[in-house]
Amino acid sequence: MLLEREAELATLAAALEDGAEARGSVVLVAGEAGIGKSALIARLPQLVPAGGRLLVGWCDSLGTPRVLGPLRDVSADTGPTLAAALRSGDRGAVLDAALADLGSGGRPTVFVVEDVHWADDATLDVLSHVIRRLAALPLVVILTFRDDDLGVDHPLRQLLGLAARVATVRRVRPAPLSLKAVRALSAARGVDADRLFGVTSGNPYFVTELVATGDVDSVPLTIADAVAARLARLDQSLLAAVAQLAVNPSAAEPWFIDAVVPGGLSAVAAAEENGLLTIVDGRVIFRHELTRRAVLQAMPAARRVEANRRTLDALLARSPLDLPRVVHHAKEAGDRDAILAYGPLAAREAIRAGAHREGVAHLRLVLDQRPDLEPAAEADLWESLAVESYTVDAPFADAVAAQRRAVELRRGGDPRTLGASLRWLSRLTWWAGDSAGAAAAGEEARVVLADAGDPDLLAMAMSNQAQLFALAGRDEDAITLAEQGLALADIAAGTRSHLLNNLGLAMLRTRRPGGYAALEESLDVALAADEPEHACRAYVNLAWHDLERLDFAAAEAHATAGVDLAEGAEFLTFARYLQLIKAMVRFGTGRWDDVVALAAFAADGSPPIRCAALVVIGRLGARRGESSAVDQLREAWTIAQATGECQRIGPAAAALAEAAVLAGDPSSALEAVWTAYRLAHERGTPPVRAELAYWLQQLTDEPLEPPPASDIADEPCSLLRLGRWREAAQVWRAAGCRYEAAVALTHSRRPEELLAALAELDELGAEPLARTVRGELRALGVAHVPRGPLASTRDNPAGLTQRQWEVARLVTQGMTNAEIAGHLIVSVRTVDSHVAAVLAKLGVSSRRELVSRSDELGFGA
């Protein structure tokens, strides 16, 4: 019986009705294991509108997920286009076919992906592609997933965030059954319902499993033991068949059952009657994943290995090979030869489909076997692992180690492959935060390739060094090297894009005409050549320059387009970087409530990205008066110093200076700002030089040389430093920089300007500077100084700080303290303290009470 699910079914029905009228939407069915997500999906055939179709695909708990598994499950029912695209392995063709077959012809379609928390990257990529275009399609996408162990960095979170931004989203979260429902389910078996409710907490699966035993008092209180009680009733042949199927996390097709179970499908019919197995679309699955795992855990290790070996033999006898399943069972069977034979093929298939994380997993499994290969072949595997790890932003220390291994294996061989590997080593080492190591590997790559007879590889090595020169502030060297590379014949489009990118970057840094146009050409070339890495770099550098010239609309447009490209290509490294730029746009324009959520994603990235993210998060925290800000900025400063690059060191020092001034402790940042100021005069851009000079003026009375005349008109910090605060305020106000414009007004001694600054600061929630301005107004004799934003007091009667309010909101959204810590980039201990303070101020006794009273306390949506 399906009890207490009327509201959930009504939500599903409403979504299906909208889909029938070409108002596509997403339904997220989330909850813990056993809560009844699949039971709801089982009722969908009764809800699908007349003429509509229901397509159900599964994600399986394989060691490495099946590439595009849910699409393969439904391809027989969608039409020939998708099936052909899947056979081709071409990622672009799969994206186009999925959208065409799922949303074509005006026929209402319900596409269900079960257990999407186990999805591979390529499946998430297809879902992102479809969801972005969903609004006008007769299509409803329903995703079921467990959210009880969905970490803050789980790949699915990116898809869920995208859905919330671009589509109509309905959320279904089945609740545990009430005592009344448990009594209804247990009545026929004479089970003690009160005890059953206490044992299961109303989890429907646990309830039905224990009801099936008939005696809750005699059954141990674990689901594994409840399943074991069912297994004890099976005869030996049926038990063996069930155990054989349990090693297979995928749905079992009829051919597969015939191959591994004596007697085939008829031999497992009794297990279906017993409630252990069920048949969906002609395939056999366990009624619940927990059941399968309980059966698997009960098997002796030797029998599990034997069953996996039998499964592997069946899969290898079938054409075409289902490579992820083959590799999974080869691993479980301990078959090293099969792993070495099919692991690289599975990795290649995954990478081609855009499932980069799965490619990394397959490559690691193969290399863990310590294969005895020719040096060049083994180097190819290590290099593929390194490059794919870079793509998905895996720990860069691991990527660098893998690439170093590839380089060593190539020494003494073909200079072309050695030079190309050294160039990759340089690139990865830079992302790991080691600029000196990157420079050394880059120089060696150029030397090795100088006489190798491959102009394209040489040009890329030259471009790599030009990039390092530009990032280090050696702009003239960068321009010379990039121009030499562009002059070489027979270079590929991707190499040309890379060279143009670095040329444009160095020209912009030196304010030469044509730099921005070179970046735009770099982007156009990369997009036309389908080179997402180079296109993403162009988007980053265009947007970064837009930020420097205070053109926030252009920066946001470039960052948004770049994020779409990076997410579509599963290029997580650049997705983080471009999301950070969106956070910087919001920070610069005073839209502060969005900053932390965007920057937190970036802060989990490589050292250069984490450094910039911590600067933004910490600087915002300083402006809001948050105690954690200084620690975040000190970490950013440490990372920045390790890079040796002014583009990291300058902003980190400026942020430390601002935090020190706001805290009334200017001397604490003086050394860092002097260090950055001296470097900026040699290697920095005009905006960085101007800001550091301004902060030095705030921190010390020591005279500084005046800014260059060419910098004054374009740099509001230089205007401010020269006492031309009205002009600085006008520049910032025109750009939308609310906080900076208010800061400029605070340099006035006239009450009307100070009052205008105070109003802006209060609206932004910039309490430290607002407090200083209030003091200045009182010192000037202003009789009626505004007390502060009363609306905040009314909305926050308990007197929570801004950070406590934010933590409370996240608690009511169901986040754990660890998840909140990751989201806000603070320690778990800090979150523990905030939560304790929130509970005390609000007078609630527990997190549960806070959640239950969220609307009453003002934390509702």
Image (cartoon, grey):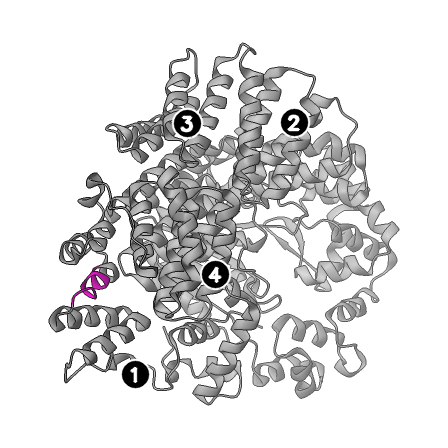
Q: Which tag, 4 or 1, sits closer to the chain's start? A: 4
Q: Residue tagged by mark 3?
A: 498
The residue labelled by disc 4 is 632
- The number of numbered badges drawn on the structure is 4
Residue at the spot of label 1: 793
* Secondary element at image label 3: helix
Cβ atoms at labels 3 and 4 below 8 Å apart:
no
The image shows residue 437, relative to residue 493, as above or below, that is below
Where on the picture, by quarter, is residue 792?
A: bottom left
Nearer-N-terminus badge (1/3): 3
Residue type, numbered disc 4? Gln
Q: In the rendered structure, which disc, 3 or 4, sits on the residue that comes first in sequence? A: 3
Front-lying residue, 201 or 22? 201
Mark 4: give few (<14), some (14-19) or many (20+) Cα within 10 Å.
Answer: many
Find residue 407 and name its label. 2
Disc 3 packing (10 Å; few <14; some 14–19; many ≥20)? many
Where 266 falls versus 348 (above or below)? below
Q: Amino acid at mark 2?
A: Val
* Side of 201 where 620 appears, left or right: left
In three-dimensional space, the C-alpha distance between marks 3 and 4, rounded to whole angstroms, equals 33 Å
Amino acid, disc 1: Thr
Looking at numbered disc 3 in the image, what kind of residue is underneath it?
Answer: His
Magenta segment, prevailing SS (helix, strand or loop): helix
SS under mark 4: helix
- Which is more foreground, mark 4 or mark 1? 4
Task: In the displayed orientation, state which residue is furthest to the bottom.
Answer: 843
Q: Nearer the viewer, mark 3 or mark 4?
A: 4
Q: Magenta segment range? A: 741-748
Residue 49 can be seen, yes or no: no
- Residue 803, horizontal then vertical, whole percent: 42, 72
